[in-house]
Image (cartoon, helix red, strand yellow):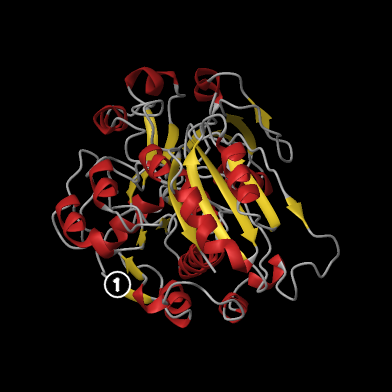
């Protein structure tokens, strides 16, 4: 069963790498896989002669993608267009025809309809943690790689949640609101330290584990629930059911992806199990909590407070007009999906996803892809590289190797990885036969996409 904290849910890789390479540390010249980190990626890429003009490869970056990401792509010679907001499906359909790489954050939806029209699209970069805004299954079938940044804003989200735990326990929003209204109300009633309290974390993934460590440093007891057995960090303890965790916790913090499994996973039935006066924090996905039920339990006093950073529907742009049943609820912190929005996190996300996209376009590297096999074959300027995405059916590798043998093609290196739906093959071949080899491989019935990279 998929982990609640896994991103994206339900994606399983069946890796079957087949690789042959020349022996010796210098088999691939001076371009080792370690030479493609950070800005050296651009410098290293200039040492191989790509078969495509970079200024004809169009990058479309939406939703104010970090300037650091834009800088990486422009420096590498690609044609980059930026749009400061999310695009609707209709708007995206109008623009997608000539786009090779699409960059988005959390609001733009990349649907099957969009992917069907995107004939030139090679990859989608999600400049965020989640990838549920992309139809991953269809992208996989079309051989479109999807990348994200699963670690870059982990610290930012965990810090905000810890801040909210303290603020809710001390009822700081009430005191601040009173002071801004000119009311001095120095009270201790209903205000508590977090030391000794039990924090229940639902979804013990990258953010959940980081929060676990930070909360223990504050003296909290930590319990967690995840569908997949996880190694507890520090003194944290797993719980076998969500119900057990809810009944035990003074604070419940949610860190799960959007999926059918997690939709309205916190509603009346679950809220009723929580301790009287307990706190609920949702910095995960807006579909996880049924807000009408949460509002009822806050107003009744059963819950002592809540912090909500994500909502079922969110405005497409900044400004007035936000509406929610939680507005006016006591001791409730509402924030506009900013848990991961720090300067540090956005810069890290921009660089992490940009490098992944450039390594894929320039070298065929899929390390970090959430929907294709993760492969990285070192680069050599002395060979031609062919990339082939094909349906994962019996006999494809045999057919490809037969083509190579029949064309008397010298294979310098070969690597294959598979998912349940597709296979991804990287082949480095002799210069004299590469064009003919590519044409023959592309003609196979199982081939989805074949590229002659360099």
Q: Is residue 380 left or right of residue 106?
A: right
Q: Which residue is mark 1?
A: 82
Residue 73: x and y in percent read: 44, 75
- Residue located at (54% from left, 69% from top): 454
Q: Quadrant of the N terminus?
A: top right
Foreground of the two, 414 or 92: 414
Q: Is residue 389 above or below residue 181?
A: above
Observer-nearest of 1 and 334? 1
**Residue 365: image location, x then y, percent:** 58, 58
User: Which residue does the image show at 53% across and 37% down from the upper left?
Assistant: 5
Would you say residue 371 is visible in this rendering?
Answer: no
Between 408 and 200, the residue placed more toward the observer is 408
Q: Is residue 11 above or below residue 452?
A: above
Taking the spot 62% from the left edge, 31% from the top edge, the residue there is: 223
Give the class, few, some or many, for how many residues have Cα within 10 Å of label 1's Cα (few <14, many ≥20): some
Pick out the residue farthest to the right.
Answer: 24
What kind of element bears circle 1? strand
Front residue (pair 240, 263): 263
The answer, for residue 359, to whether it is visible in the render is yes
User: Quarter of the image holding residue 190?
Assistant: top left
Residue 346 position, x and y percent, is 45, 66
The correct choice, above or below, for 9 with respect to 51 in the image is above
Q: Is residue 312 left or right of residue 362?
A: left
């Amino acid at each position: 069963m998929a982990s609640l904290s896994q991103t994206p849910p339900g994606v399983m890789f069946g890796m079957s790498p087949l690789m042959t390479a020349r022996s010796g540390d210098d088999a691939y010249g001076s371009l080792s896989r370690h030479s493609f980190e950070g800005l050296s990626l651009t410098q290293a890429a200039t040492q191989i002669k790509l078969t495509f003009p970079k200024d004809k490869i169009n990058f479309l970056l939406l939703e104010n993608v970090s300037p650091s990401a834009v800088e990486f792509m422009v420096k590498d010679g690609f044609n980059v267009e930026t749009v400061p907001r999310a695009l609707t499906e209709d708007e995206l359909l109008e623009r997608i025809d000539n786009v090779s790489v699409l960059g988005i954050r959390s609001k733009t939806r990349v649907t099957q309809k969009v992917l069907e029209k995107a004939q030139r699209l090679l990859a989608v970069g999600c400049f965020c943690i989640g990838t549920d805004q992309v139809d991953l299954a269809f992208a996989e079938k079309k051989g479109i790689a999807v990348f994200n940044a699963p670690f870059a804003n982990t610290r930012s989200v965990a810090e905000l949640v810890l801040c909210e735990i303290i603020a809710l326990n001390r009822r700081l929003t009430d005191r601040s609101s009173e002071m801004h209204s000119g009311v001095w109300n120095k009270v201790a009633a209903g205000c508590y330290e977090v030391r000794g309290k039990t924090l229940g974390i639902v979804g013990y993934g990258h953010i959940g584990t980081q929060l676990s460590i930070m909360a223990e440093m504050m003296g909290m007891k930590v319990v967690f629930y995840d569908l997949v057995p996880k190694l507890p960090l520090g003194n944290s303890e797993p719980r076998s059911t969500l119900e057990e965790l809810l009944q035990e916790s003074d604070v419940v913090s949610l860190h799960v992806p959007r999926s059918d499994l997690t939709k309205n996973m916190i509603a009346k039935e679950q809220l009723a199990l929580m301790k009287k006066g307990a706190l609920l924090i949702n910095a995960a996905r807006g579909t996880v909590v049924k807000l009408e039920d949460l509002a009822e339990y806050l107003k009744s006093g059963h819950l002592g407070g809540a912090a909500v950073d994500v909502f079922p529907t969110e405005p497409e742009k900044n400004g007035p007009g936000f509406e929610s049943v939680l507005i006016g609820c006591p001791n409730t912190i509402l924030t506009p999906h900013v848990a991961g929005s720090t300067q540090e996190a956005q810069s890290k996300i921009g660089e992490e996803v940009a490098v992944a996209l450039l390594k894929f376009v320039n070298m065929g590297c899929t390390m970090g892809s959430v929907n294709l096999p993760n492969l990285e074959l070192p680069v050599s300027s002395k060979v031609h590289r062919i990339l082939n995405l094909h349906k994962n059916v019996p006999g494809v590798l045999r057919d490809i190797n037969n083509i190579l043998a029949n064309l008397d093609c010298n294979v310098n290196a070969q690597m294959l990885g598979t998912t349940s739906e597709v296979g991804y093959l990287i082949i480095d071949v002799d210069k004299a036969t590469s064009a003919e080899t590519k044409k023959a491989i592309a003609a196979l019935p199982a081939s989805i996409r074949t590229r002659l990279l360099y």
